[in-house]
Image (tube, rainbow, N blue to C red):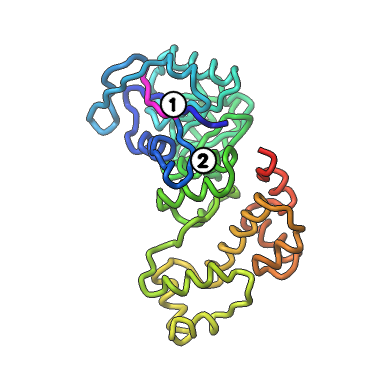
Amino acid sequence: MLKNVVAVVMDGVAPFELGVLCEAFGVDRSDAGVPTIDFAVCGVTPGPVETSMGFSLVVGEGLDRVAEADLVAVPAMPRDAGYPEPVLEALRAANERGARVMSVCTGAFVLAAAGLLDGRRCTTHWRYSDELAARYPLAKVDPDVLYVDDDNVITSAGSAAGLDASLHLWREEYGAAIAAAVARRMVVPPHRDGGQAQFVEAPIRAANAPTLAGVLDYMASHLGEEMTIDSVARLANMSSRTFARRFRAETGTTPYDWLLARRVTEAQRLLEEGDDPIERVAVLCGFGTAGALRHHFAKRLGTTPQAYRAAFCHRDR
């Protein structure tokens, strides 16, 4: 179980990507029912660390803190740096004892230097994926995904993809409801399009939607009902054309795509938390038939409802 997380920093660390890890694992959200993580930032030794933005951080922990962690995370680092051997040794030791090891953006170069990407599928920021593959030919670099989880080694693409990978870990360890609570507090987008299917619950509206907030809430709470653009436009006291235009302006998408994303998300939750047959899940989510659910699941997530349930059902945890 994920209870103890450490971020390893060295000179040249990118503060934003470090902030991603601090936000994902270092914030106390126990008031929302989220388990508290024992989170720390460590360096080779305690003391000041220069960031890529020209200011310094002072870390209070050394690498001995890594030995206690369930997850050892490396934020973005300079790609051409000679990484300290004690850091590489600490990462190898963590992996060997079964801890998860994670990188954000160019932190993947540190994992690769430690040999942890040899023979593993992995990713990094698309600008540097060719470089990673050329320098570490044993790594199976996939430039088209947001994150990869390969046998307890997680690599994520550019900055915000670190949040996707972090939410993936929350979801794997604690289930959909906890991941949703974390995501809601971080106010992340409800759906992340990308080459890799994202097993991250969409917990919030895409935008504040000041005009349509009530309509969006209604749609989200009546997913099992048949809806047309005409019927929801009437709820907003608008013509269908005006409603469609206002909907895109306030949410960035169409009513159909917004509703479809919510229905897939609700299907994910039901598959994770319940044991209703696929046919029943399809009805409850508004897809009508199991075939329609399978179609949209495959299109959006790249998997089947059955396979998703097998991978992410948490009833026995």
CB contact under 8 Å: marks 1 and 2: no
Residue 313 placement, left or right of 192: right
Q: Position of residue 223 (x, y in %)?
A: 60, 69
- Specify whether residue 121 is painted magenta: no
Please say if 148 is above or below 41.
Answer: below
| CA distance for labels 1 and 2 | 15 Å
The quarter of the rendered structure image containing the C terminus is: top right
Three-letter amino acid code at the position of disc 2: Ala
Q: Position of residue 194 (x, y in %)?
A: 54, 51
Q: What residue is drawn where x is 44% and y is 12%?
A: 86
Query: In which quadrant of the rendered view does residue 20 lie?
Result: top left
Q: Residues within 10 Å of mark 2 (few under 14, many from 20)?
A: many
SS for callout 1: strand
- Of the numbered discs in the image, which one, if any, rests on residue 68? none
Q: Residues within 10 Å of mark 1 (few under 14, many from 20)?
A: many
Three-letter amino acid code at the position of disc 1: Val
Q: Earlier in the sequence, mark 1 or mark 2?
A: 1
Residue 213 placement, left or right of 145: left
Residue 164 placement, left or right of 159: right
Residue bounds of the magenta highlight? 38-43
Question: Which residue is tagged 2?
Answer: 165
Camera sees residue 126: no
The quarter of the rendered structure image containing the N terminus is: top right
Please say if 181 is above or below 113.
Answer: below
Q: What residue is drawn where x is 37% and y is 26%?
A: 41
Question: Which residue is tagged 1?
Answer: 6
Please say if 191 is above or below 249.
Answer: above
Q: Is residue 165 or residue 273 the one in the foreground?
A: 273
SS for callout 2: helix
